[in-house]
Amino acid sequence: MVDDLRWQHLAPWAVRETRGRRVPEAPPSWRSEFQRDRDRIIHSGAFRRLEYKTQVFLNHEGDLFRTRLTHSLEVAQIARTIARALQLNEDLVEALALAHDLGHTPFGHAGQEALNDCLREHGGFEHNLQSLRVVDTLEQRYAEFDGLNLTFETREGILKRCAPRHARRLGNLGQRFIDGTQPSLEAQLTNLADEIAYNSHDVDDGLRAGLLELDALVDVPIVGELLAEVRHAHPRLEPRRTIYQTVRELISAQVDDLVRTGRERLSIEQPENVSAVRARNAPLIAFSDDMAHAHRGLKHFLFHNLYRHYRVHRMTTKAKRVVVELFEILFHDPRLLPPQAHGRAQALEAERGERGRARAVADYIAGMTDRYAIAEHERLHDPTRLA
């Protein structure tokens, strides 16, 4: 009854019902199934640890820089706005936005790249798969099952990308990566809300850190135009507020384009239901051609001027070294792991050999916050630290 009342306003192609959970459960009394997913995600240990995981800048470099937690909240805000405008399922979108980074390592993409290198002979490391691993297995909170036992739709949307070799062992959940079909519209729009959030807010953080100059944005597609408009409308506005206003306009422009383009495509295609959405070989939620071009230009600018800045490179180099050295010492001597992680390593090694031991060590490291990883590295390498 709860779902029936809530979903009356939804479009025919929106998700209303779930295909179910891995372990069957009685339906919730006062929440939708996707609200239950959201609540389980918010109460998980992995979600809380996002507060101390890097977005671009290390967490301890400044209190105002974004972390994986603040980023996830910003994605949820943007995604819910788009979902409401397109009459899609806001509860599912919120759950997807809050869960999408649960598998991220400490130190952001630097940590992910380092762990992938460490596991090259043991199956590799993908943060999307790790997010699924967190919600399916690694969270240990409930008496009846491992993981969070989320709905199929939330688990489907967590997998933004997945290599075919991994998809084959995921059954129905991974089939779309093999046959080229699509996830729900809710998953499609959350993926793009993620891009809107991190591109726009990395501009803000880069300017705040002094790694980007405001005038350098003048020639960047869409950003330069919006900056010129802000300066024309508010010629005496102080630089900090000019940045805020420009980033705000940048987010609004991308959201407006995504909603407008989504409405046009859905009006033309008129998919009968969610199954018709999934059967397509291309997404229905996308930017217009002009905005997609501008988006690529912004990503190109950030890649060369922020992510490759020498100060960021110094940080990522040190971060990779920490992750690699942690993996090497723990893989070669699992007795150095805390008891629960050591027990898991023993169990997985008995089941899968060295590949299982490597995965258990990777699980332990991937779950670390930035500051815990630094402290653990120091404990294991500094002879003056005994524990």
Image: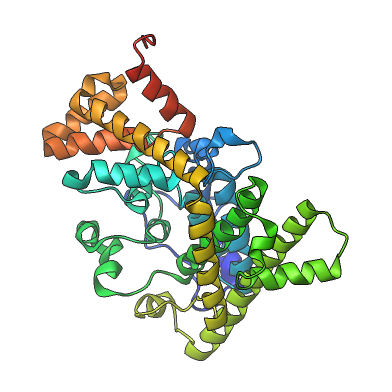
Would you place residue 67 above or below residue 244 in this image?
Answer: above
- 130 relative position to 122: left or right: right
Position of the N terminus by quadrant: bottom right
- 256 relative position to 25: left or right: right
**Residue 292 location in percent, x, y?**
52, 76
Residue at 36%, 9% in the rendered image: 386
Position of the C terminus by quadrant: top left
**Residue 210 location in percent, x, y?**
64, 47
Count of numbered marks: 0
Residue at 29%, 37% in the rendered image: 362
For residue 336, which quarter of the picture? top left
In the image as oriented, which residue stretches furthest toward the right? 236
**Residue 252 location in percent, x, y?**
68, 68
Would you place residue 315 above or below residue 170 in this image?
Answer: above
In the image as oriented, which residue stretches furthest toward the bottom? 268
- 121 relative position to 68: left or right: left
Residue at 34%, 80% in the rendered image: 281
Would you place residue 304 above or below residue 352 in this image?
Answer: below
**Residue 14 location in percent, x, y?**
50, 72
Would you place residue 66 above or below residue 230 in this image?
Answer: above
Q: Is residue 103 visible?
A: no
Q: Is residue 270 visible?
A: yes
Q: Report the front residue among 199 and 135.
A: 199
How is the structure coloured here? rainbow
Q: Report the front residue among 199 and 280.
A: 199
